[in-house]
Each structure stands twice: as C-alpha cells, then as structure tokens.
Amino acid sequence: MDTMLAGRFHLDSKKFAVEEVPIPVPGPGEVLIEVKAAGVCLSDVHLLDGSLVPLFATSDTVTVGHEVSGVIHTLGPDLKRGLAVGARVTLEAGKTCGKCAGCVRHRPCTQMLTAGIDYDGGWAEYVIAREDTLIPIPDSLPFDQAAIIPDAVSTPYAAVVATAGVRAAQSVGVWGVGGVGAHNVRLARLVGAAPIIAVDPLPSARERALAFGADLALDPTAEDFADQVYAATAGRGLDFAFDCAGVPAVREQAASVLGLGGSLILVGISPRPLTITEGLTFNYMEKQVRGHYGGTPESVSELVQLTAAGRLDLAPSITDHIPLADAADAVHRLENKIGDPIRLILVP
C-alpha cells in the first residue's frame, strides 16, 4: 500500500477534504508514525474557518491535526535516539524551525512551527515526526487519552503551573469550560487552588465543571455575577482569571473581578484586539495581563507521568470516537457545540 487517507486543508481555496495521498517517507532524524488517535481542537476549526492563518506554512496544502498518538512504523536514517519500531508515542504539538542552535520553543527566535497548521499533522493514517518531538507513552495509557495531552491538557497545565504559577489556596476563575477550560479546572484543583470558579453560559458546561472539580459554576450573564465571585473569595476577588474562550467580553469581565495583584491569563487564542477598558482601578489594584501560548515539551512529559501514576484520569475528557473519513462531521460538531464535546477523537 502506497497511499493513505488524510484530512487536507487547501490554504489557497480554503477547502477541506479527506483525500487519498502518498504515504510520506521519513528523512534524516525523522520517523513514520502509524496514527492511532487524533484529537479535534478548536484551533483546527479556526484554521478551517479562516480565523487562524498559518504564519510559517511550508506548503499550500496541509494535513490538519496537532493532537496525535500512535506507534512508530518506520525509522528514518541518522537517528540520535534509541527508537524502536512499534514503540507507543504521543507527538508534541509543534516544533522549532531548527535554524537556531539550542532553541527552546519560540525563543530566541519567533518561528515556532505548529503541526497541522504550518506543516503536516496527524489527521491521517500515517504522519512524519521529527525524533525530538516524540514522547513515549506507557501501555497503560490509551491512545485517545495520550493524543489530547500535547494541547488540550498541556496548554492549560503550562498556563496554571508556569505562566500563572498557581499555588495552593489561591483563588482561580476559568472562563469557558470546553476542551481546554475543562482541563484548566482539573489542573487548578490538582495544584490545590481554592476556590475554583468556573464561568460558562452553557448549563451543561457548568455541570461538567463541577464534576471536574470546580467549587462554584456561574453563568456570566447573571445580574449578581460579580457579587457571587466576591462572596466566594471572601471579598478579595480572584488571584487568577483564565480566559479559555478567547473572547473580548470574557477578558473584560474577568479583569473586573481580579483582586489585588490579580492576573488575567490569556489561554484562548483570538485574532481580535486585546482591550481592557477598566481605568484607574486596574493600576491601583496592580492587576496584570499575561499572554500564554500552548504547552512545553516538559509539560507533555510531566502529564504523561501524572496520568501513568493515576493522578489524572483523562477518560472523562473523551466525548466520542469518529472515523477519519468523517473528519468534516467532527469539525461541524465541535464548531456548533453539538453534544457540548470536550474532545472528539478521529480514528484512522
């Protein structure tokens, strides 16, 4: 067999289709992965609807998908790691451009390539991976759960432990309890945050937030919303507010209920301008806004360890499994919140 199915997005025509394409061949320092599971992320939806534009696209057509797990199928030449065919792995969601020696993420340069956006990702039967982007996974970790770690879980994990540096007993608010926000709630609880307040207009999302460890779940449209936040935090306001929705109105509301020295953490991405209309009180209260993007190689490895140790069960995060051939249907379900999914998984 020389061909495979792949979910391909044509950047020029903005058309997406599952097509038959040649199976790629690994080059130096690369391996060919047989994909077992691939997550469907809101970033994928934003790519297909045109609101997310690739900055460093290597081709005019790209295979979508940056949440991928599988087994090593073929080894390329000149590998430096002791990799073996059949090894179970998950893939980091991006890679550095390779032009800077010792480059870490997008520092010192700004060219961080994202799988499924800038180069071919894992909505396919097979995918090429650079050897330094592979994270081994234990036999006890199912492929569907492993696939979502590099973004849906590692993005909020890095936001909580690195960008924010949440400590035990600090108060946290999470706006938008979808694929990323639901894990933000769980991870805030894992590090001991208290209270954890989830904010979402959907009743089902609020119920899920409580099941995932939130102490309180609020409707952002409630007239007494701010009063409820202050009551839950003994009048102090939030230490951290995580915007997992990427919506301007969320940022305004979240910033308004921060306490002294509180920080708004921008986890959700959006092409729209960042505006904070609050005036003098923002300065007086010494509030902060911190940008955040994705996870880190360390966060993926640490999360694999946490799941293997039983500290984090990701089974409740898997909403459904969908055949790769029906990828367009999965995108439609996520875009329109049909069934209020956390993560849909494509299976080749």
Image (spheres, rainbow, N blue to C red):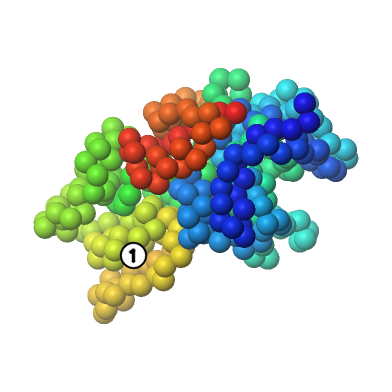
Residue 220 x, y percent position in the rendering: 21, 54
Residue located 52% across and 37% down the image? 327
Check the picture and name the quadrant holding the C terminus: top right
| Towards the viewer: 171 or 218 | 218
- Image position of 245 with respect to 27: above or below: below
Residue located 21% across and 41% down the image? 203
Residue 152 x, y percent position in the rendering: 48, 42
Q: Which amino acid does label 1 sit on?
A: Pro
Residue 304 x, y percent position in the rendering: 56, 33
| Towards the viewer: 309 or 38 | 38
| Towards the viewer: 83 or 25 | 25
> Which residue bears the numbered disc 1?
248
Q: Is residue 196 visible?
A: yes
Q: Residues within 10 Å of mark 1 (few under 14, many from 20)?
A: some
Residue located 33% across and 72% down the image? 276
| Towards the viewer: 275 or 47 | 47
- Image position of 56 with respect to 80: above or below: below
Extreme residue toward the bottom, this view: 280
Q: Horizontal placement of 92 versus 313: left or right?
A: right
Residue located 69% across and 42% down the image? 133
